[in-house]
Amino acid sequence: MDLTQQIFLALLQGLTEFLPISSSAHLILLPRLLGWEDQGLVYDVAVHVGTLGAVVIYFRTELLRMSRDWTQSLMTRRQTAESRLAWGVLIGTIPVGLCGLLFKDNVELYLRSPQVIAVATIGFGLLLWWADVYGKRRRDEYSLRLSDILLIGIAQAIALIPGTSRSGITMTAGLMLGLSRNAAARFSFLLSIPVITLAGLLEVMDLLEQDRLIDGGDLLTGAMIAGVTAYICIHFFLKLLERVGMLPFVIYRLLLGVFLLLLM
């Protein structure tokens, strides 16, 4: 993999990981469309670590408060808004964790085709538009109940299908439940932290079973590019979301899906 491919893939991962347009679909499609060799599991792990670092740094203040109150809740059994949110993030991760362990191989084998990506991109894009238009958008992430969290968690598990978009489907579920756009996005980003961590650990376990030489410099470069790009993307997405809404991303998903269908 040459330097140009490394840079493009890292930028693509950073831009798409937290936008509702499916990073996995783009990482699958770009090499195929441009005739590049597959970047491999090692590089995917590196750029995902970069985006994980970006979201942790961006939400560092909130994460410190949530961790502090969550730890205290274990000892005192008294809940605060921050500890409830921390529990919500952990509980919301359970469905995708279980589905990932049970169905990861089947997803890799049967659902990484351009056809599946095209249909998921269009279908879940339209669902995002519906939720954005008809959602009440009155609640914040601290108002989520256990039933709400489980619903968002189940939605997140559906994102194992390439083209769905983990951030897109969790924001869609949040909007359906009456969250504001910003609250839906923030909870989606917080949910990404344990999900990306678990996915990275599974990929690392796969890597340990392989006997391959790893270029640490290339991986570090990819992780840094993806991380910086993702941080900037999160910042401006949250700043502009209430103003522009989800429509630009819905239009992009529809155009991408139609392009893929025509290409096939």
Image (cartoon, rainbow, N blue to C red):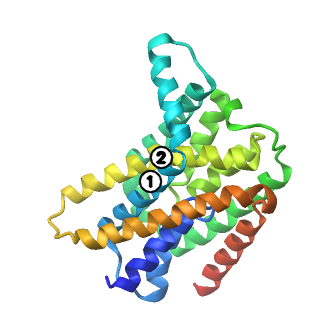
In the rendered image, residue 260, in percent from the top left (x then y), is placed at 60, 80
As shown in the figure, which amino acid type bears the numbered disc 2?
A: Ile
User: Does residue 219 lie above or below 137 as drawn?
Assistant: below
Mark number for residue 155?
A: none
| Disc 1 to disc 2, C-alpha distance | 6 Å
- Of 228 and 163, which appears nearest the observer? 228
User: Does residue 65 lie above or below 59 as drawn?
Assistant: above
Q: Picture quarter containing residue 179?
A: top right
Element type at mark 1: helix
In the rendered image, residue 141, in percent from the top left (x then y), is placed at 68, 37
Label 1 Cα crowd, 10 Å radius (few <14 / some 14-19 / many 20+) = many
Q: Is residue 49 left or right of residue 95?
A: left
Residue for badge 1 = 52
Element type at mark 2: helix
Q: In which quarter of the image is the C terminus?
A: bottom right
The structure residue drawn at horizontal position 57% and vertical position 49%, both measured from the top left corner, is 189
| Extreme residue in the left direction | 211
For the question of whether residue 164 can be seen, the reply is no
In the rendered image, residue 43, in percent from the top left (x then y), is placed at 33, 68
Q: Picture quarter containing residue 219?
A: bottom left
- Of 133 and 261, which appears nearest the observer? 133
Residue for badge 2 = 193
- Which callout, 1 or 2, points at the residue further toward the start of the chain? 1
